[in-house]
Amino acid sequence: MRPLSELGASEATCLHGLLFDVDDTLLTRGKLTEPAFSALHQLATAGLELIAVTGRSASFAEMIGQQWPIAGAIAENGALSVLPGTQQDQAIDPLSNEHRQRHNRQLQALCRDIQQQCPELRPSTDAHLRRSDFTYDIGEYRQPEPTLVERATEIARAQGAWVTRSSLHLHVSFERSDKATGAIGFLSARGVDETSARHRFAFIGDSDNDGPCFAAFHTTIAVNNFCGRPSVPPRYLTPSGYGRGFAEAAGHLCRLRRQ
Ligand SMILES: [Mg+2]
């Protein structure tokens, strides 16, 4: 990873938008600080289309879609999306009801098994709001033993589930969605050519569930609290972590685009 300062003007000026992770990237341990929220507005004023790409629930994405200066939100690690300012400001689910119900039945059975075999592992506080996945708290309010998280991961994978993790949550799902597929699908549906999307939209994130976006997009930035081992690392690293790092990245992009 190279320092953010090496991201140059030619790369910054060709961008149409910024895709951003929310927890521990924009937010600082769950809080939206003033510099981070100002940074969102500065980016929007600089003409960049902003799209949140989060592991959080569809309900959370619907809420930020109404309140933040964003053009869209991808929720639940790519499974659902929200297009604010339209009659479709409720999350768009690409699966049919029948398909969704089948996945949910599979997921409920898997979660019963995990609960039985790993009773110390607790659901995240937003688990009941989710439509496509189930999440366990591995860093938001609880710090379970790594072996417990590994055990739950093994149980899920043995049943054919897809597993990923952020700095806060362990996600299990029977959908093969990921943040990059969700983001590119969202942009394609809005008429952005896929190849163009990969070069015209930058991504900023912090952890393993951001890995598909670090691999899919050309301009990728990690905030300094970056953790995990994605197969393709982000290209640039901010000097600071969390929301302060997000604000540094925003300031750098805006400065280069003004020159
Ligand atoms: Mg994150």
Image: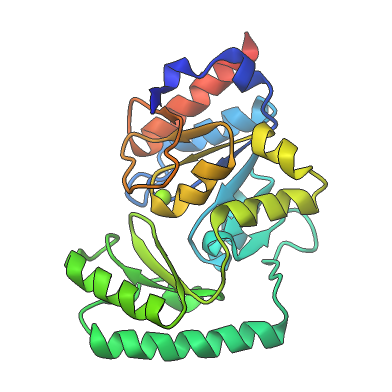
Taking the spot 73% from the left edge, 48% from the top edge, the residue there is: 187
In the orientation shown, which residue stands out farthest toward the right? 191
Q: Is residue 147 visible?
A: yes
* Left or right, 172 with reference to 255: left
- Where does residue 56 sit, x and y in percent of width and height? 48, 61
Q: Quadrant of residue 100?
A: bottom right
Q: Point out the image quarter for the N terminus.
A: top left
In the orientation shown, which residue stands out farthest toward the top? 259
Residue 53 drawn above or below residue 111: above
Q: Quadrant of residue 238?
A: top left
* Left or right, 93 with reference to 176: right
Residue 81 drawn above or below residue 13: below
Q: Foreground: 148 or 119?
A: 148
Taking the spot 56% from the left edge, 31% from the top edge, the residue there is: 219
Residue 129 drawn above or below residue 47: below
- Where does residue 247 sit, x and y in percent of width and height? 45, 30
- Where does residue 47 sit, x and y in percent of width and height? 70, 28
Taking the spot 70% from the left edge, 31% from the top edge, the residue there is: 16
Q: Foreground: 47 or 37?
A: 47
